[in-house]
Amino acid sequence: MTTSLLMFLVFIAITLGITYWASRRTRTAAEFYSAGRTITGFQNGWAVAGDYMSAASFLGIAGLIAFSGYDGFLYSVGWLVAYLTVLLIVAEPLRNTGKFTMADVLAFRLQHRSVRTVAACSTLTVSLFYMIAQMVGAGSLVNLLIPQVSFNAAIVIVGVLMLVYVIFGGMLATTWVQIIKAVLLMAGTILLSILVLSRFGFSILDFFEAVSAVTGSVKDAAGNLVVKDFTQPGLRYNGTWGALDLISLGVALIFGTAGLPHILIRFYTVPSAQQARQSVVWAMILIGSFYIMTTFLGFGAATLVGNRQIGVRVKDVMAGCATLTSEQLAASGGCDATMAVAAATAGNPARGAELAAQLAEHGYVVPVTNTNLAAPLLAEELGGEIMLSFVAAIAFATILAVVAGLTIASSSAFAHDIWLNVVRRGRGDEREQVRVARITAAVIGAVSIVLAIALKSLNVAFLVGLAFAVAASANVPSIVLTLFWRRFNSTGMIAGMVTGLVSSLALIALSPAVMGVDAPTAAVRHLIQAPAIFPLENPGILSVPLGFLGAWLATMASRDTSSEEKYAELTVRANTGLGAEV
Amino acid sequence: MTVTEGPHHHVTGEEWQRLETSPEFRRLLAEKRRFVLPATIFFVVYYFALPVLVGYFPALMERRVVGRINIAYLFALSQFFMAWTLMYLYVVRARRYDAMAASIVDQVRRQAR
């Protein structure tokens, strides 16, 4: 593992060099929050891609496809199509009317300080959830790839590095860390895809032939095991609520992206709305190509590594099942290796390992490892230790780039929105603002390090889903309505945001992602040990309409003529760029 | 904190109202709406067709087209090309929106002088 360590150190050295360079160009608030608006559309496109493709998408998606086949690929689709919402509706008006944060746009004609406070709180909520999920992921990942570094040490290293980038280098250093990460990620993914295809003589048909030979099994509505191959849908989303859950996931994915504060603030780093549009175009080309290639990463891991290391020999196990006596079946909790995989895939590897152990007692080999390792293991299979180390370094870079973006988003929400505009009522000076932003970043970093260490034994995979759901349900209705509905007012915005926030939080708390009964021996546990009340893992299908409904009802119940008058200014500026921040 | 202060000039509340109702600006909005609204409806419908078909009509989606490649995979893949096509169409039209917006901005600046 010394190659891994070496590559990590090289990456750290380069990014620290960039941070030193950026620190000499980061003095004013505009420089700290938005790199002085000097980033070009092309550069920002790479940075958006680097900010967006988190460890959840690189490692998570590869693992999801490697374990659940086709259903995992549906995430890839949603993550790109989401950018049409950003391109067509949000990016340009945001750049034209805002300054540093998401709340700028919302507070443009709804000038109540409460509007800014609620919007900033929503930003902090989304960013912190997202960050904790990334940090916990970072801890286990670094620990798995370099066993010499413990889980806690890994989190502290990631946390401290991200703070150094943000506090000293501001948005400029963060942008370049994201660009470098995106270049590494694209290079690694293209290389792996070519290597995977080379194993099949560059024949897509042969590749899919092999994919369809990998199978998994699911319980149908009647409780019978159904074997499906990996090209078939339904290995992850199935049963009574499966289809609806899939639709609900889609709602959160394609609307949520347009409400993720750390993505939105990237559009302030370019000089104009045209450059903002250009960045979305480049980001869409990169993100789309990457997610298409997840086909090769995920299915490649399932076919090439699958049967030996990460896969489950479901066919073998099922053949063996027929020979078990009913007492033996009862003892192993049913002859179902898929339950073990499903538990592992749902971010609950301990439960998976436990089921696997039960099966092993009866002579079956069900090797279940961390699903996040599908991509690194594929790399090792294809290119040996060098390739493994390269992919590990990419994963490390990925996490750092994303957490740095999240830290900037949260620190600007606090320093610019809450401190400058609410507490100081817009009267603080530049130096004070930048100082507050740096202190906020330090506090947020410390809090997320502590929370990540405290929550390491909980199943936190749902936190990313939660961030998307909150963004889609609380932020997007207000952004859309303030841009397109003249009658919209402060009461409506606050009601909409609170309804969206509360309903998505409550529905997730009652969902199978948080509620569930674990065996007493499980190492990773559900937060609430009781059967789930809300049947869907994804709340979007209910919470997004609720967010819009709350905003609409409260707007209709009140009247604010100043907000209606200010709509003229908002829409002219949003569409022409007149008086936009330069 | 009012933000009517542009870098080049000062625009008052009534002027914004006048600009918003000006025929040039109405034309720009109408032009934008003519593409953005149908495009948005189209991509939302096209996108949600995927989970709906996959979730409720798996037998149809599992039908194989070429070798082992099935409709489900091809339809999912087509979403990427749908997104890129809409992106391209929008960017081409956006050049026209930019020109229209620029002439409105020019007009305002000339009057301010």
Image (spheres, rainbow, N blue to C red):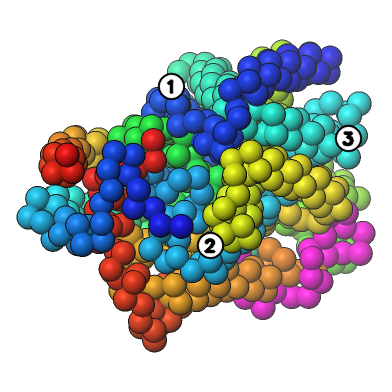
Q: Quadrant of the C terminus of chain A?
A: top left
Does residue A537 show up magenta in the picture?
yes
Name the residue carrying label 1: A203
Residue A28, placed above or below residue A79: above
- Look at the magenta stretch and give its main secondary structure: loop
Q: To which chain does the residue with label 2 belong?
A: A
Foreground tag (1 vs 3): 3
Q: Residue A11 in the image: state x and y as whole percent.
A: 70, 18
What residue is drawn where x is 9% and y is 50%?
B24
Q: Residue A135 in the image: state x and y as whole percent.
A: 75, 43
Confirm whether circles 2 and 3 share one chain: yes
Magenta highlight range:
A518-539
Q: To which chain does the residue with label 1 belong?
A: A
The answer to which of marks 1 and 2 sits earlier in the sequence is 2
The answer to which of marks 1 and 3 sits earlier in the sequence is 3
Name the residue carrying label 3: A153
Task: Tell me the distance, in whole angstroms, between the alpha carbons under discs 2 and 3.
Answer: 37 Å
